[in-house]
Amino acid sequence: MIKLYPHQQKELEATAGKNKVAYYHDMGLGKTFTGAEKLMQLKASVNLVVCQKSKIDDWVEHFRKNYDDKFVYDLSRKYDLENFMSYCNSDYPYVLIGVINYELVFRRKELSQLRDFTLMLDESSLITNENAKRSKFILNKLQPKNIILLSGTPTNGKYEQLWSQLHLLGWKISKELYWKHYVSTHYEENDEGYPIKIIDGYKNVERLKAKMREYGCRFLKTDEVFDLPDQTFNTFKIETPEHYNKFINTGLVTIDDREFVGDTVLTKSLYARMICGSYSPEKMETLKDILQSTEDRVIIFYNFNEELRKIEDLCIELNKPVSIINGKTKDLKCYEEYDNAVTLVQYQAGAMGLNLQKANKLIYFTLPWGKGSCGLWEQSKKRIHRIGQKRPCFYYTLICKDTIEVTNLASLCEGKELTDELFREVK
C-alpha cells in the first residue's frame, strides 16, 4: 500500500464514486501516485496508461514496485503487446496494466478492441489538438469505462484547448457550442485574403469552472500544499552573435564551414535560433563560467543536437560527469551518482515528468519555441522545484541581446508562444 500525502488522500476522497476524473495538479505534487491509486480504486481488470515515451519505464517501474499482484506490460514492445491482448481476451484472473506512449498508441489498432477498461492519460494536454492522429484514436476509437486525466498544465492558460479533455470526461457539448459559450473571437484576413479566427479572450469563465468540477476536474497548486524553497531567476545578457544580423538581413551566412540559408520563414527562424545557441562563442563562454563556478549538480535545457554535442564537449573539458535525456537517450546514471554531474535535457523529452530535485541549479541554454512552448517552459521549472527539494532553486537564462531570444523570453514570461509565422514580424 502506497503512503500518500494528505493532499493526495484528500483529492482521492473528493473524487470517490466518480469513474471519470481529471487531476490537474501542479507539477511536483505527485500526480503519478494519485492517478495510480485512483486506477486501483476503480478495480478494472484491464487498464491502459498512455504517457510520453520518456515516461514508459517510470510508469512500468511504479506499478511493479508498488503493486506486487499486478501484471504490467510495456506495450511499445510487440511481445508485451501480444501477451497483454491475449490475456485481455481470456478469463485471466489478474489485474492487467498496459503502458504505451502517445506517438505509438494510434498505431496499435488492436487496443480499440478493449472493453470495460480504465484509461489513464498522463499529461492529457497532449490531446488538445483533436485533429492529431493520437487524439482521434483516443477520442473516437477507444471505448473505456473509466477515465483518469493527469496534467499540471491542461490548457497552458488557453481555455479553447480544454474541449477534447472535457469531451473525454463525458461532457457532450459540441465544439462549436463550447466556443460560442466560452471563447470570444473575431476574424481577420491573412496575407492570402483568407479569414483567420482570432481569440480575443474568454467569457462565462465561472460557469465553465463549475462545469469542469461537475465532470470530475480537480485543480491544485503547489503553494496550496507545501512551502517549497525560494526560486531565484537570473538572466545573462550576452552580446549579439557576430553573424546574426547579417543572417537576418540577407538570409545567408557561413559559420564554421556550414552554410545557413534562410529561404523560408521556417528555416530562417530555425537557423536564427541556432546561431544564438551553439554558434555563439560568447554564450558558450558564459556557460563555461557558470559551470566552473559550482561543484553542485546542474540541469541544462537545450534544443538542438549541435548544442548537445558542444555542451557535452565542454563538460568533458571541465571534467564534469554527464547525463543525457532526449528522444534517443534516457541516462541518469551520472546525475544519480555524482554531486557535480551536469544533466542535459532536451525540452520535448524531459520538460515534463522528470524528478530532478537532487539538483537546485537549472540553466536554459536556449529557450523552447512555438506551439506548446509555454507549457514546456512552465513544466521545466518544476523539474527541480518539487516535493523533496530542500534548497533554494536558481535558474539561469542565457539570452543573446538584440535577437529573437529577447522577444521569445518576454513572450514566455507573459504566457504567449512565438511561432515561425510571428518570426516574420518580430525578428
Image: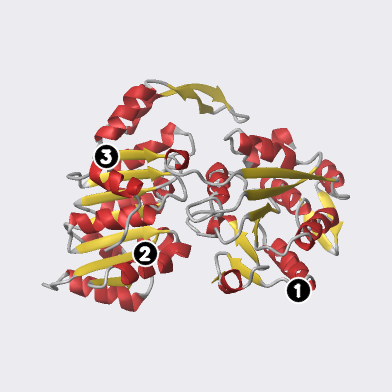
Mark 3 → mark 1, Cα distance in angstroms:
51 Å
Q: Which residue is mark 1?
A: 319
Q: Residue at x 63, y 72 (%)?
A: 338
Vertical arrangement, residue 345 with respect to residue 410, above or below: below
Q: Nearer the viewer, residue 389 or 149?
A: 389
Res 284 seen here: yes
Q: Secondary structure at mark 1?
A: loop
Question: Are dots 3 and 1 in contact, CB under 8 Å?
Answer: no
Residue drawn at x 25%, y 56% as measured from the top left: 39
Q: For residue 129, say whether it is visible.
A: no
Q: Please tell me which of labels 2 and 1 falls first in the chain.
A: 2
Q: Which amino acid type is shown beneath numbered disc 2?
A: Ile
Residue 36 location in percent, x, y?
A: 30, 58
Along the horizontal axis of the image, is 207 left or right of 280?
A: left
Q: How many marks?
A: 3
Residue 17 pos. (x, y %): 17, 45
Q: What residue is rendered at 66% in x and 44% in y?
A: 232
- Whether label 2 touches label 1, CB < 8 Å: no
Instruction: Give neighbour class at mark 2: few <14, some 14-19, many 20+ (Cα, 10 Å).
Output: many
